[in-house]
Amino acid sequence: MTSSPLIEMFLMTMCTNYPVLNVTTTEPPPWQWVPERKTPKDVKFFCKLKQVPQLRKELLRGKKLRVITIDHWPVSWIQDVNGTMIGRGIAFEILNTLQEKFGFTYEIRLPSSMSLLDEKGTITDMLKNRQADMVAAFVPNLPDLENVLEWGAELCQYEYVILTRRPSESATGSGLLAPFAREVWFFILAAVIFTGPVIWVIMKIRAWMCGPSQVFSLADCVWFVYGALMKQGSTLSPIHDSTRVLFAGWWIFIMILTAFYTANLTAFLTLSKFTLSIHTVDDIAWYGKWMAEKGAAVEYSVQMDDQLQVLRKSLNRGRGSYINLTEIDQDHLADLVMDGALFLQDRFWLNFFMLNMEKRVQEGEQHCQFVLTLEKFLTASLSFVYPKNSILPRIFNPIMLSYVESGIIKHLLTKDLPDATICPLDLGSMERKLRNSDLSTTYFVILGGFTSACLVFLFEFIIRRYHPEEDVFLWPNNDKVGIVDAKPKMNPFSHFMNLKVHPTKIPGMHTTINGREYMVYNNRDGQRKLIPVRTPSALLFYKWQQ
């Protein structure tokens, strides 16, 4: 049955008078009018639904988009050519491919403020007020603005790291302390302090439970632990099995400990890598001074992210600042970093910055004066941005995802960078010479020893001044520190080979030092001497006195 000419005319009028589409609010017509001819005399029109790819391809054809961008070299920037703004960078390379595919044109508009914050004249404000259709730039995903803006497909992720001047020394610390972690040193110190008293208490308990037995003094146990640690040996000879096991256990512990320490120290002095002292956000806040790009993702995250609250407090104390990269050149930024400031920026931008700095290094100048931290303190997803409820993301996202999955975006981001790492943290020097930092612990030990000796000398001097008849002896009998009589009593019997000695010949007293027994006496010149007891040298000394 042939359709009525009046009905056909009505349907054709509806199709041809379809309203002009708004790319930010309205869907395209899901149909088209096509003639179907069966015979030359029988012609009618009917509605044929369009497929989704055809709708996407035809929707923007002939439309003109209002595009805004931000100056973030080398991703996006504006070049003035004969009074016309031309978009450059990776973002506009992607936009130009979309233009060829969908047949639209675009005009570039610049925001009055190059900031991501929700302020007047920024890209956020222009998109909210429908003054632009999209942002052709890699904009970080700002979670608090998801209700007013719409982000497209994720193109890549930026890792925000820290640019600092290369320090002259590694932050690993002293070479003598490096083989063990701080917790290990604390456990070793605790073992040295408590092992001696524990051995003494166990021997006391054994004597209390099993009757009279061999019990060393507390000072002897403490000195045994220290002497074993320093490989000095000991004259203590335990006769009970339990005490022998305690002594043997400590010796085995010291043997294993020193073996691991020696091996790790050798590895550190020959194979250690260069490290920085900045690892966390707290290190940034307390380092001294830090900088970040004004209006960029770092400033927004510091204001909104609770995990960066320590940077917000540091900013209030005057330790942080924001700089406008469009107002200062890279040489000025390099001078600020060389003066000791930290610069917080994405790794991609900083790699290009260091590459440009290396190209400017003259012959004879030092290379790789800057270095990047390995740890990132912030990660952000990047994509194009559109107004809320825009149809452009649904049209562009499939194409953008294909660019990402095929590696085109990654290629565009890295095509101007070398394959090797620019100024790595470890420059790979094969020579490893000991520096003062490696031996700083030995310097502190020597300084501590001299300081302790001076304090002891001052103590002895005060005692001698106010007690001229007495003397300070640090290792008296029974291991008690105190003041003893400067005029020791006569000893009628000698302990050397059980021989009798004239009292005026060898007057003195007994004492134990480092587990060995000595006779203390005054020689003909009035000087105090120590004579080892029960040794052949004691007999020689006795013959010399005769």
Image (cartoon, rainbow, N blue to C red):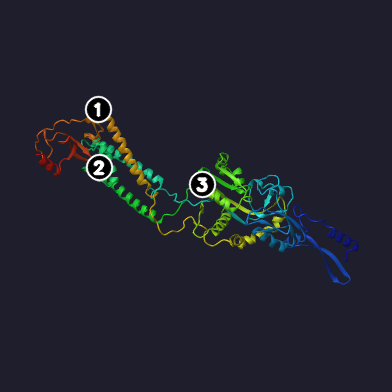
Identify the residue position indicated by label 2 in the image.
243
Label 2 element class: helix
Residue at the image point whose x is 64% and y is 59% from the top? 90
Query: Which residue sits furthest bottom?
Result: 40
Q: Is residue 502 left or right of residue 11?
A: left
Image marks 1 and 3: residues in contact by CB distance under 8 Å: no
**Residue at mark 1:** 467
Look at mark 3 in the image and give the residue it sits on: 280
Amino acid identity at mark 1 = His
Along the viewing direction, whichever of 50 and 396 lies nearer the viewer: 396
Mark 1 and mark 3 lie on one chain; the one further toward the N terminus is 3
Tag on residue 415?
A: none
| Residue at 50%, 54% in the rendered image | 369
**Residue 529 in picture, x, y percent from top left:** 18, 38
Q: Amino acid at mark 2?
A: Thr
Cα gap from disc 1 to disc 3, whole angstroms: 58 Å
Indicate which label's residue lies in the foreground, 1 or 3: 1
Please rate how many residues cluster around mark 1, counting C-alpha atoms within 10 Å: few if below 14, some from 14 to 19, many from 20: few
Amino acid type assigned to the residue bearing label 3 in the image: Thr
Q: Position of residue 226 (x, y in %)?
A: 29, 43
Which of label 1 and label 2 is nearer to you? 1
Numbered disc 1: secondary structure: loop
Q: Earlier in the sequence, mark 1 or mark 2?
A: 2
Quarter of the picture containing the C terminus is top left
The quadrant the N terminus occupies is bottom right
Nearer to us in this view, 155 or 535: 535
> Where does the image place residue 437, in percent across and percent down from the top left?
40, 49
